[in-house]
Amino acid sequence: MTIGFDLDRLIPPYVKSFEAYRPSPPDTELCRLYGIERLHRLHNNENPLGPPPAARAVLAGFDPARAALYPSGDSFDLRAALARRWRVDPDQIIVGNGANEVIAFAIKAFCQSGDSIVTADRTFAVAEWIARFSGIEARLVPLSDDRFDAGAMLAAIEPGTRILFVCNPNNPTGTYWTAAETEDFLARVGGRAIVVLDEAYAEYMDRPDYPDSRALLDRHDNLVIFRTFSKAYGLAGLRIGYLLGSPAVVEAIRRTAIVYSVNGPGQAAALAAVEDGDDHLVRSRATARAARTVMEAGLARLGLEVKSHHGNFLMARLPIGDTLAQRRLMRQGFSIRPMTAFRYPNWIRITLATPELMETFLAALTGVLARR
Ligand SMILES: *Cc1c(COP(=O)(O)O)cnc(C)c1O
């Protein structure tokens, strides 16, 4: 098709050079393509237990008539419940359409074209992508021993650096900074930049030395915490994430937040999940832990190198290409995450689901690797 105007001239160079992320096709399409009856999703770190019972009840009882009405434009009730839980003011919280959206809000609030953010080279890449397609430099610091490298991140700060992103624990390596390490990092950054701790997997942590980010907030006005309902809360399909920070920092970010981006059923289900307490989180954590035990033993039997630390996922290095493994596993009904795009060629990331499903997966993987 020819276009009757000079489209090229209208696209900024940093958008032109950016390649769009292509999400995987829907399950129905994948089942048709690979000739399978059903797909076990192990590529997105979803919760195999699904949503907590209280959230299920709210969703089942959601009045269809309310679909015609705009929801609260700033997730009023959900922020109130989160504020009680965190013991902060509701104005210290912004809810977004997934944590992905609050990443964009934060970058828009603090960075202009030519500024930079600093993060790791092998981590959840959404902050890097948003920066790059917004004309903001993403300074990527190599992980050291699969961990965020505090010293190298500090060294990467330049006068235009506005935000430092730390994924804790890190997706995909599962490593984390302790409270002492995080505190030390914040002290050394001082007030030079905003520090974001992306705690998407915090609910899966069971280490006493994992940072108490609420306590850190009291001491560091430049700290912003990201949380999500997509992982341990089992609400990924409803797209709810949030950030919290000091009143002044959150007030700045609110200016760039899109109002009404969070849908009504999502707000209601997340509210019920928060008010339901911790039972579901405890069960989700225990399930992931049991799955990890099964997977570590099984992958060791296969003689594979693994990175298995925290979160509801682990990584394994395969003797065949990761995308070849992906196709073969698909034919067995399992989706996994090939890690070449995360700069880990021939590694795959696998969601820790139930122990039973992990046994089935290991059997499929054994078959896939035997066919060499
Ligand atoms: C899954 C994930 C998120 C965001 O999830 P949303 O579904 O957008 O809330 C953010 N950070 C990390 C590290 C993640 O793994």
Image: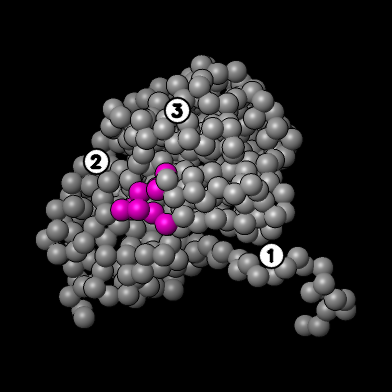
Mark found first going from the N terminus, 1 or 3: 1
Indicate the position of residue 221 as horizontal and vertical percent values: 58, 26
User: Which residue appears at 35% of the width and 49% of the height?
Assistant: 147
Is residue 143 located in the magenta-colored stretch of the structure? yes
Asked if the residue under mark 2 is in contact with the one under mark 1, i.e. CB atoms within 8 Å, the reply is no
User: Which residue appears at 28% of the width and 32% of the height?
Assistant: 207
Q: How many marks?
A: 3
Q: Magenta segment, which residues?
A: 142-150
Q: Nearer the viewer, mark 3 or mark 2?
A: 3
Task: Determine whether the residue tagged by mark 2 lies in a helix, strand or loop.
Answer: helix
Can you identify the residue that label 2 sits on? 289
Mark found first going from the N terminus, 1 or 2: 1
Label ID, residue 244: none
Q: Residue reaching furthest bottom?
A: 2
Above or below, comparing residue 50 to residue 85 in the picture:
below
Indicate the position of residue 370 as horizontal and vertical percent values: 17, 75
User: Badge 2: how crowded within 10 Å, few (<14), some, or many (20+)?
Assistant: many
Q: Nearer the viewer, mark 1 or mark 2?
A: 1
Q: Amino acid at mark 3?
A: Ser
Find the distance from the CA under tag 1 to the CA under tag 3. Answer: 35 Å
Indicate the position of residue 284 as horizontal and vertical percent values: 32, 36
Find the distance from the CA under tag 3 to the CA under tag 2. Answer: 23 Å
Can you identify the residue that label 3 sits on? 213
Can you identify the residue that label 1 sits on? 14
Q: Residue reaching furthest right?
A: 4
